[in-house]
Amino acid sequence: MKYHQISSALFVKNRKKFMAEMKPNSVAVFNSNDIYPISADSTLPFAQHRDIFYLSGVDQEESVLLLFPDAPYEHQKEILFLKETNDHIAVWEGEKLSKDRAFQVSGIRTVYWLQDFHKILNEMMTYADTMYINTNEHYRATVETETREARFVKWWKERYPAHNVAKSNPILQRIRSIKESEEIDLIQQACDITEKGFRRLLSFVKPNVTEYEIEAELAHEFIRNRSKGFAYTPIIASGNNANVLHYIENNQQCKAGDLILLDVAAEYANYSSDMTRTIPVSGKFSERQKAVYNAVLKVKNEATKMLAPGTLWKQYHIEVGKIMTSELLGLGLLDKADVQNENPEWPAYKKYFMHGTSHHMGLDTHDYGLLHEPMKANMVFTVEPGIYIPAEGFGIRLEDNVVVQEKGEPFNLMRNIPVEVDEIESLMNS
């Protein structure tokens, strides 16, 4: 891994939180992700399942975590199963976790090789009444590939039909959404790397540069700062491309006078950052571009203040919509008749701002969090309003990552990333 080792104390705390919510006499199992094939002998780069990483720190394929807080013996309460390493694997693939190294990473003392998993699981199931299975229940999830976790669940249900079944995901949705201080530090590190990439761009962008050249500059800066690269597929959208919300082709030339919407961010140690900035290709905003930009910035700043303990996500978006409506009226994009005659199910402002303002973030860019429950301190949210005007050939979105505080305004993890018009223009022309 490129990142510095994370203290095992974080993963010890995370497991304690999860096990405290388990039913009596129950077992929970978490599997690593597969390495996914492309064609021939090609594969996608390995990306660890965030749940097993959150609970163990293990960032390696073919790994299994078993938790059994009521096990009859102390050494059975937390068990890791790993792919057995050997000299051949070390030569061809590089070093894998040894049992001692796995303890240093995870804080788990009982470590077996994976070939012992079924035998030991069978013993645990003779003691347990309930199995926690780990299914993907994220509100944005669309899963068409059978995962390693899904294969395990299918096998387990056939092998142990007399046991009760419980779900890990509701517990994880709650505990993963509230970040430990170590996690906030890791997200801050990802944001700091993103800042370095963005500042690099401000002196690089000029008329006729291509979107993919900008992508290459970011990738260079991210990786040289110990990131694996982008936290998600980068959006580098010049001109009217910005009005395609998930534009990822990044293959066009950036023309003088246009704006570039950059929805780009680094990961660090599997933790995401999520930034959007909009900058002028020529280094200076037109008066109209500046007016729309400052309207988006005002909405972002006002929306940020509303992220506080007790706030309900649905009501928050209604209030942000009111602020955006006011700004769109001021820009002449809406008139009073548009607002008076709007459909409550699709308010008038949605013509120019059609997506949500905030989502949870952390180990996943769209992280775990139950949206029907009130916000709590130490949740991390994006704030990302936008105004999209295809008729005028540009779209503007601005996005920061903020931590909900027990008292006072949220803490902006992207506070050092330039966002004011004057600062962006000054840096681009220095």
Image (spheres, rainbow, N blue to C red):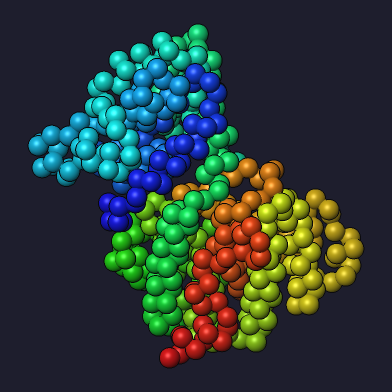
User: For the view shown, which residue lies furthest in the bottom direction?
Assistant: 430
Percent of width and height locating residue 94: 16, 44
The answer to whether residue 50 shows anywhere in this view is: no
Q: Is residue 429 above or below residue 323?
A: below
Count of residue discs: 0
Name the residue nearer the viewer: 325 or 249.
325
Q: Nearer the viewer, residue 347 or 267?
A: 267
Question: Picture coordinates of residue 310 (x, y %)?
Answer: 71, 51
Picture quadrant of residue 224: bottom left
Q: Is residue 425 in view from this perspective?
A: yes
The image position of residue 27, as x and y in percent, is 45, 22
Q: Is residue 29 above or below residue 302?
A: above
Residue 256 in the figure: left or right of residue 345: left
The picture quadrant where one finds residue 325 is bottom right
Measuring 76% from the left and 67% from the top, which residue is drawn there?
A: 323
Q: Residue at x 49, y 21 (%)?
A: 26
Q: Is residue 319 above or below residue 239?
A: above
418 with respect to 287 (left or right): left
| Quadrant into which the C terminus falls | bottom left
163 lies above or below 267: above
Residue located at (39% from left, 26% from top): 77
Picture quadrant where residue 201 is located: bottom left
Residue 172 in picture, x, y percent from top left: 53, 38
Q: Residue at x 43, y 17 (%)?
A: 156
